[in-house]
Image (cartoon, helix red, strand yellow):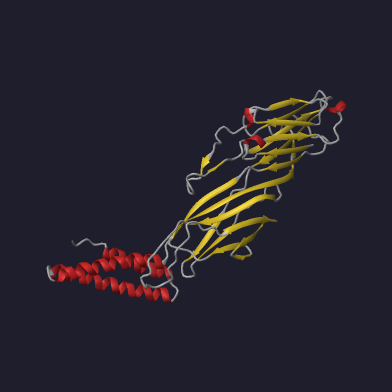
Amino acid sequence: MKITFNNSHIRSEQVITVYFENYDSETWSGGHVELAPPFGAKVTQTLTSSDTYRFTREDKTLLDGSNRVQDDCNLEPTETIQKGDFKRGKWVVNYKDSGGAITSASFLIKEPSINIDYDVNISNSTCELYDKTNYKMNGGMPKTKSYSLKFTAPAVECANTGTMGRVYTAPESWNSGSLMYINNRASKAVATTEDDKFIVTPIYNATYYIRYESEFTYTFSATPITSEDDSRATATTENNLETPSVIYETGKVAMGSPVGITSVAQTTCDVWERIKDIDIKYKQALCKNTILADKLRDILDRALQLYVLAKKANEIGNAELALLYLSKIVDVTKTRLI
């Protein structure tokens, strides 16, 4: 027996097909094949002269009523992800021949839990992405139908102020490329690649978005069981019939995650504007309010001290320390004196 479990995100394609190989109608006609979902009522079809039986969306008990079109709220608000509607979890199949002999088997239906990790290096202006997902299910690895991993960001502009670091202008949409999943490895087709990661460079001061979508095909054998193993099973003893094989077509597996990046270059742009604003107010106060001018001069002195420290930290490659000094400049210059 072969069970093809198609949980496509395209609802017209969603179907569970049970196919009896080398079917003998005299042996099977009058018997039945029965599917028991992880929860809810069983669905039974009587065996006839046909060797193929289809369970569709019309069998509502097989569907997960809580599964709806989900907004991918971390990404583009206009996009949605449609997932397959058949229930996930442990399924049981019972099939009985015309003589009353019953065989029961179980199999697990689920998608891999996606784990995309990343490491931002501001000094090198890189973001390294890693696919750490464990794709193994029912003891086997899948065959890839489609795999896409994208890294996008909105446009970012920063006027050239002659400050430290490189200043980048990001395109309106930046796509690093896609990955093809092969034999539990991620083989990349992107600008810069290594064995188990791909590198995005340059990066900008912006909120990036990781966007992952994939579809897989799993092939594995079901596990023979009896009613003692699972109450949904109707077989009381194991027999010598061949264990059913299962082909599981996953629906669209998707995830989205924001990656906030604060670069030294962009932060320097921001604090430089603050320092210039304080300098203008200082010059205006010199002739009108010497007490205020003295306070503004103290702020300028401290801000410039921190600026020199931030610049030195960036020059030696310590971007985190540079950002710390720059954040202190923000604290110093945000004081409202006038």
Residue 86 makes an appearance in the image: no
Instruction: State the image coordinates of residue 129 (x, y, percent, origin top left).
Output: 55, 60
- Observer-nearest residue: 334 or 269? 269
- Left or right: residue 267 versus residue 277 is right
Q: Find the residue positioned furthest to the top.
A: 30
- Observer-nearest residue: 3 or 292? 292
Above or below residue 2? Residue 59 is above
- Observer-nearest residue: 131 or 91? 131
Instruction: State the image coordinates of residue 294 (x, y, percent, origin top left).
Output: 17, 71
Instruction: State the image coordinates of residue 181 (x, y, percent, origin top left).
Output: 66, 55
- Left or right: residue 178 versus residue 18 is left
- Left or right: residue 47 versus residue 116 is right
Q: Residue at x 65, y 33 (%)?
A: 37
Above or below residue 317? Residue 183 is above
Instruction: State the image coordinates of residue 75 (x, y, percent, origin top left).
Output: 49, 49
Residue 258 makes an appearance in the image: yes
Give the quarter of the image for residue 274: bottom left
Give the position of the N terminus as an image quadrant: top right
Q: How many marks?
A: 0
Give the quarter of the image for residue 150: bottom right
Q: Residue at x 22, y 61 (%)?
A: 336
Give the position of the C terminus as an image quadrant: bottom left
Above or below residue 190? Residue 49 is above
Q: Residue at x 31, y 64 (%)?
A: 330
